[in-house]
Image (cartoon, grey):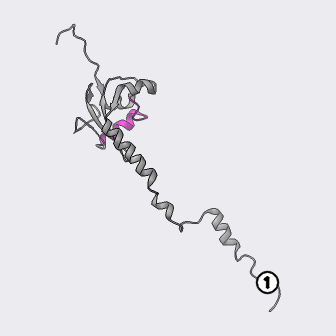
Amino acid sequence: MEKNQPTTPRVRLDKWLWAARFFKTRSLAADEIGKGRISVNEQVAKASREVRVGDRLDLRQGPVVRIVVVKGVSEQRGPAPVAALLFEETPESIARRTQQALERRMNTEPSLAIEQGRPTKRDRRQLADWNRWSATAEPE
């Protein structure tokens, strides 16, 4: 390598994910990488892997899977508009994410249909009051 050639900055994957604001802390990013929820160029990655411009990242955050292409590298976490310039989400990923959001909105939560369950504090008070003064002072 010649000395006059500019070198591209080398950034660890966990640090880049933190700088691009996918995770609140670098340790959370490293934990997710360790769990195998993030892959680089369709290969399971380690936190120490270096990210380069053009790399394809598959991120799984809960039920949502995002596919992004690295457009820039940075070691510093900046404002959200600057962080958004570091990556570009693929159109397929955006379409899938919006479809999943629509399905979550349209389908009701199964637990909302349950009428019985643990009574609330108000329910417990009403249950306790129904027979509190049932004894009468009058003989029958």
Amino acid beneath label 1 = Thr
98 up-or-down from 113: above or below: above
In which quadrant is the N terminus drawn? Answer: top left
Q: Quadrant of residue 135?
A: bottom right
Q: Front-most of 25 and 54?
A: 54
The reply to whether residue 31 is in sight is no
Q: Which residues are magenta?
A: 20-34
Q: Front-most of 33 and 53?
A: 53
Q: Is residue 108 magenta?
A: no
107 up-or-down from 96: above or below: below
Residue 28 position, x and y percent, is: 39, 38
The reply to whether residue 123 is in sight is yes
Residue 89 position, x and y percent, is: 34, 33
Residue 88 position, x and y percent, is: 34, 30
Please give the residue where the numbered disc 1 appears in the rendered image: 136
Left or right: 84 in relation to 42:
right
Q: Going 25% across and 27% down the picture, which residue do you hit?
A: 54
Q: Front-most of 30 and 16?
A: 16
Q: Main secondary structure of the magenta part?
A: helix
Q: Going 37% across and 48% down the picture, which residue do you hit?
A: 63
Q: Secondary structure at mark 1?
A: loop
Q: Quadrant of residue 26?
A: top left
Q: Front-most of 22 and 30?
A: 22
121 up-or-down from 47: above or below: below
Residue 49 position, x and y percent, is: 26, 31
In which quadrant is the C terminus drawn? Answer: bottom right
The image shows a total of numbered marks equal to 1
